[in-house]
Amino acid sequence: MLNTEPNIAASDDFYQELIDLHRDLSDEESALVNAKLILLLANHIGDAAVLREAMQAAREEVGGTPLPLGEEKG
Amino acid sequence: MKTYTNPVYPYTRAADLSGAPRRWPVIVAGAGPVGLTAAIDLAQRGIDVLVVDDDNTVSVGSRAICWSKRALEILDRLGCGERLVKKGVEWNVGRIFFRDEQVFDFNLLPETGHRRPAFINLQQYWVEQFLVERLGELPHAELRWKNKVVGVTEHGDDVTVKVSTPDGEYSVHADWLIVADGARSPIRGMLGLEAEGQVFRDRFLIADIHMTSDFPTERWFWFDPPFHRNQSALLHRQADNVWRVDFQLGWEADPEEEKKPEHIMPRLKAMLGDTADFEIEWASVYTFQCRRMRSFRQGRSLFVGDAAHLVSPFGARGANSGIQDVDNLMWKLELVLKQRATLTLIDSYDVERTFAADENIRATTRSTDFITPKGKTSRIFRDAVLMLAKRHPFARRLVNAGRLSVPAVLRDSPLNTPDAANSEFEGAMIPGTPAVDAPVTGPRGDWLLAYLEGGFTLLAFGAVVPESNVAALARSPIPISVVQVGDRSTTGACVIEDPDGVLAARYDAKPGTCYLFRPDQHVCARWRAFDPARVRAALARATGESAMVEREAA
């Protein structure tokens, strides 16, 4: 299950590092870094159900058609 | 072409033009690789088969070039695998490049102990020629060139096929029509049927070039290479020093312009270097589609290969899956024609092969989406995967330059008998799986698959099937031959040895284990001990009897 309770000890530090990660990058480069970061973290998590839950949560309130809930994809 | 001259097969006037039309058990429409394979399989089973084709030669241009391990194993059963393998070039290794560097390489068959490699590459025209020659050896087949199907009508259990020839039209009757007339399938159109699905907005240039080169026999795939920016490219060796080159062009490319040598040459020189010495043999620009018919059976017409389903070419899942269609269907057709099984068994072809087609469509659609990302974000993720893949192993599994053809595991087939709860089988060989080869010794040579040919086979580990049962199984209306592994105690079964224990390991076998294989070498049931009643029940299920009972009950 996706943990959405506070889980990062120094949360302000983490946030600052995340912002700093993109310093001096163009929008396109930033998008690439973000994509790489997502892929690295997703592999680390590994659990398909957790990943799916995170994707659902990320998509909430953003628009488009909501993702179908809990769909197993072959 | 420098390396191949298309044969011109003779047209002969069909006797049906003047006499009464003959009735055939089976007519095959289309003498491509799939139609020819179907005809060979039927003729080998002793079933009279008429093949009609509107042309009088084999494929023009190389077209399908990668023949998978499973297709070769099927063609081994049909007496032509060895010829393909001898002529073709064997490969197991692929390399992926992103921009100007290699990201990683992979080996498709890292394990030994298989007769056939993961793939051979061989131009489609050679394959068709070998199949035509093999068919010519078989007394039950007749192949008529320049005979074009122009009409199909059905009345009850009769299909009437109207055929147009240079000498006029004739009609011929059949119990079954195998429709193997390719992607555009005129017969599909005549019957008012459709293949539904998706057309991709991209164009690809493929060219065969003749070149003497020391490039290795590997599949090289480039994403966004310096010689062809923002697109993909592929280089692959075929027989006779012919190389397949594939350039992604994008949707806006003009197919007629791109086919001209003055447009192809600069692309090739950029890829191969200014000093490379080569000649263009054949070139074509194509788009592709992922579609299938809703059902592969329409009354007495059975659709196989591209006529039934179309996939994008990344993954070599077109011709290879067509050959697997044939492998699946022909033994069923034989049993139905000999009145040993009902039409339910024919319907299982549709169930099993639409399942496989969906798997192939899903795999090739995903490859296409990776190679041709739809939109900016997809492209960013694609590039992110490729950048990560060089250093991080996990990302290599996400790179998708084609998921190369492997046979479908028919895990949900109604013909399977599920494992008993206490049988505790491990490993991959669940019911519905095509047999995995293994080195053995015995009277029919050194590979397991040669012992699983023709009909149903019970593979028993140890002398566990009593002699009286071996004889009874061989005599039953649908015979089962018993192959016994190890233990030379006489039971009348064919005895093979498993000298290195590879066979037992691949099948998670213990003394007493029995596997029942269908004529298409798929596992349909397995047990930890021999029980004749269970074997009979599994045979009934695998030939459509129990499935029918269940369907009626439901």
Image (cartoon, coloured by chain):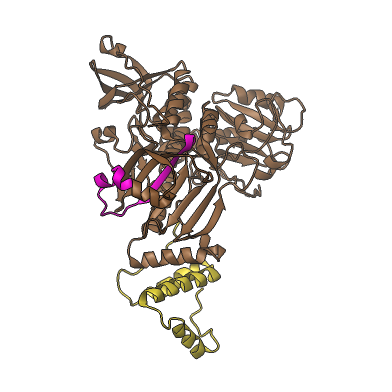
Q: Colour of chain B?
A: brown
Quarter assignment of residue B23 = top left
Q: Nearer the viewer, residue B220 or B409?
A: B220
In the displayed image of the protein, which residue is found farthest to the front?
Answer: B275
Q: Is B484 placed left or right of B168 in the picture?
A: right
Quarter assignment of residue B105 = bottom right
Quadrant of the rendering where the C terminus of chain B is positioned? top left
Estimate the x, y position of residue B202 in percent, counting from the top left. Answer: 31, 53
Q: Is residue B262 in the magenta section?
A: yes
Q: Nearer the viewer, residue B178 or B116?
A: B116
In the displayed image of the protein, which residue is found farthest to the left?
Answer: B168
Work out whether B290 lies above or below B49: below
Q: Is residue B338 visible?
A: no
Q: Is B29 placed left or right of B425 in the picture?
A: left
Quadrant of the rendering where the N terminus of chain B is positioned? top left
Estimate the x, y position of residue B445 in percent, counting from the top left. Answer: 66, 28
Q: Is residue B31 in the magenta section?
A: no
The residue under the point 40% across, 43% down is: B354
Q: Is residue B445 visible?
A: yes
Quarter assignment of residue B475 = top right
Estimate the x, y position of residue B356 in percent, counting from the top left. Answer: 44, 44
Chain whose colour in the figure is yellow: A
Which residue range is magenta in the image? B239-264
